[in-house]
Amino acid sequence: MDVFDAIRTTRAMRRLDPNRPVRDEDLWTILEAASKAPSGGNRQPVRWVVARDAEVRRRLGEIYRACWAEVGARYRRVVPPDDRQTTRILDSADHLGEHMGESPVIVVPAARGADPASVYPAVQNLFLAARALGLGTALTTVHKLREGEVRAVLGIPDDVETYAMIPVGYPLGRWGEAERRPIEEVTYWDGWRRTRPRGASV
Amino acid sequence: MDVFDAIRTTRAMRRLDPNRPVRDEDLWTILEAASKAPSGGNRQPVRWVVARDAEVRRRLGEIYRACWAEVGARYRRVVPPDDRQTTRILDSADHLGEHMGESPVIVVPAARGADPASVYPAVQNLFLAARALGLGTALTTVHKLREGEVRAVLGIPDDVETYAMIPVGYPLGRWGEAERRPIEEVTYWDGWRRTRPRGASV
């Protein structure tokens, strides 16, 4: 798959098929892709904790459900009902809130006090590689509200930070480009808020 | 370019050709790729401050030089002289320390109090897209030591955080795969430190 196609069509897939297994070999492939991302001084701080066991996933799912219930309710209070795009995201996030534990695989990147700049680029590599293999993913961080419980389930030491809880599986929804603001609106040239249209000279 | 080839061969390119210009259209392309990355609730918090002007770049380069002088010296003190890989990285980082300001383009992602999980995946998209176009990049964050000075040069408000200083240009060095630890060593299955070889069943 072309890298631009992968970038364009990689979006959060929050409805995953609980019954379609993910091959180990595909997991190795996407984890290896993740490991190619940069890290400060090439220290490669991330450890990838992969939950395959059904009971481990179920327990992670319980924690995630509790966290999302709290965060999702907060969002619902502030999103205007006529904001259909955000409402659609919240609906699918609610689905994930209920079903995280049934994801065929859950990946938790963890590291001892790493700069996030040495973690999340790797997560994006993992997402793009998964997309190329037809596997859906979503970046969630709300588990941080109960990070101690996540550590307990996975036996992660207290001084190790967890950076995400990522469901992996074959999507039930369709791929497709995520909606974004025009890049011309969020690009500033040589100074804050200095936008210019595409095609204009500096 | 295939997404896996892009992922495999995107590495920090710290020696860039100061005399070979980068096309505006290529910048739009890599910024648009960046914008496709996920952000919490699709809030898209990142603004891309792109330094093109020679004087703006020169001033950013001065700040970067001072920051790297401090950080680089700290690294040098702790790296054993026989650690050739790290020494090689430090040598090229020293080069960038001296020449950041001559990079044809410098990109500074900025946002008001965004979760880094909504910033660095976009940075990785930008890197991969740049790679596909033959453009080199490097992820640096040492400018944070003098972030106030960076804000002053770019007119960025005090309540806006800057997440990286990214040189963009045609590389003088060659592409090639970065060295990483075997993925089997850094992947744990269903619990901390539970490694297993590739091909083994759970």
Image (cartoon, coloured by chain):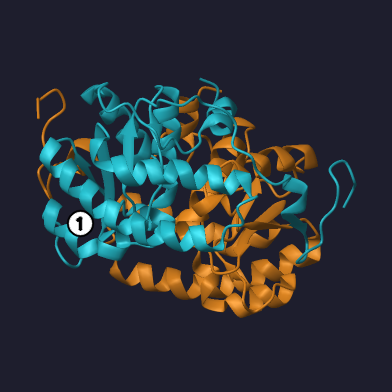
Chain colours: A orange, B cyan
Q: In the rendered image of this protein, does residue A124 appear above or below residue B163?
A: above
In-front residue for pair B51/B120: B51
Q: Position of residue B175 (x, y in %)?
A: 51, 26
Image quarter in which the N terminus of chain A is found? top right
Q: Quadrant of the C terminus of chain A?
A: top left
Nearest the viewer among A161 and B59 is: B59
* Disc 1: which residue: B150
Position above or below: B43 against A177: below
Q: Residue furthest right?
A: B200
Chain letter of mark 1 equals B
Residue A25 against residue B153 in the figure, above or below:
above
Residue B149 image position (x, y, % from top left): 18, 60
> Is A126 displayed left or right of A40 in the figure?
right
Residue B107 versus residue A98: which sits nearer the camera?
B107
Q: Is residue A14 visible?
A: no
Q: Residue at x 25, y 31 (%)?
A: B104
The residue lying at 42 percent from left, 51 percent from top is B120
Q: Secondary structure at mark 1?
A: helix
Relative side of A33 to A7, left or right = right
Quarter of the figure with residue B132: top left
| Residue B74 place in picture, x, y as percent | 45, 63
Question: Disc 1 residue type?
Answer: Val
